[in-house]
Amino acid sequence: MTLAKLSPAWYALHTRSRFENVVTEGLDKKKIEVFLPKISVRSRRLDRKKIIQVPLFPGYIFVKSDLSPARHLEIVKTAGAVRLIGTVKGPVAIPDENIESLKIMVSSDQEIISGTRLETGNRILVISGPFTGVTGTFVRYKSTDRVVVYIGALGQSAAVEVNEEDIQLLPEIK
């Protein structure tokens, strides 16, 4: 390994679904520096309305390490860890400035908008609201939190406007 590779840097670690906190605690116990950016969002549960803390990037945490072979193995052997994100040549370091920017963003009380932007033609499912259960095709953004969804049936078409938080992206059919 090169000397540059052994200097500590930040790396993105992919975790099992909903295991971000478990992996963070496991790495903390191993004395490995870890950063799990969280944001406050309104709970989607129907029985109560409360603000909860969720990961900014679901399924990912950030780890600072020199990635010596022993340290690399220690990181990926943590319960719930999947792999370090990178190329065929190995994990790719994330610039310190990016991590510092994320730390500043999550420490502020300002709303952080995250998530994947929908693209025209994406298949979606309405998961809450009056159109729950409707599947359709994303057409466009109407405003910051409203989207237009196209529904085709019997050779006819209809479009509805729903809150972006009330829809879920469906996997591509291959």
Image (spheres, rainbow, N blue to C red):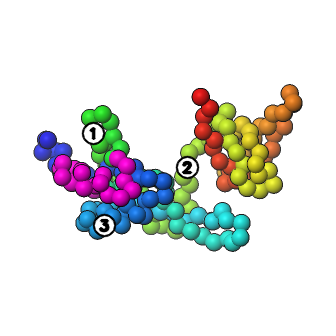
Label 3, label 1: how far apart the Cα atoms are: 23 Å
Element under disc 3: helix
Q: In which quarter of the image is residue 174?
A: top right
Q: What element carries label 2?
A: loop
Would residue 75 appear left or right of 131 to someone viewing this image?
A: left
Q: Which residue is drawn at 32% across and 36% down?
A: 87
x, y percent for residue 60: 42, 53
CB atoms at circles 3 and 1 under 8 Å apart? no
Residue range (magenta)? 64-83
Label 1 neighbour load within 10 Å: few <14, some 14-19, many 20+: few
Residue 8 - label: none
Residue 27, given in percent of the width and then of the height, sits at 31, 62
The answer to which of marks 3 and 2 sits earlier in the sequence is: 3
Q: Which residue is drawn at 79% across and 50% down?
A: 131
Q: Name the residue under label 1.
A: 90
Q: Front-most of 62 and 82?
A: 82
User: Which callout, 3 or 2, points to the residue nearer the camera?
Assistant: 3
Amino acid type for the residue under numbered disc 2:
Gly
Disc 3/disc 2 C-alpha distance (Å): 27 Å
**What residue did someone put label 2 on?**
115
User: Which numbered disc flags the more N-terminal residue, 2 or 1?
Assistant: 1
Q: Residues within 10 Å of mark 2 (few under 14, many from 20)?
A: few
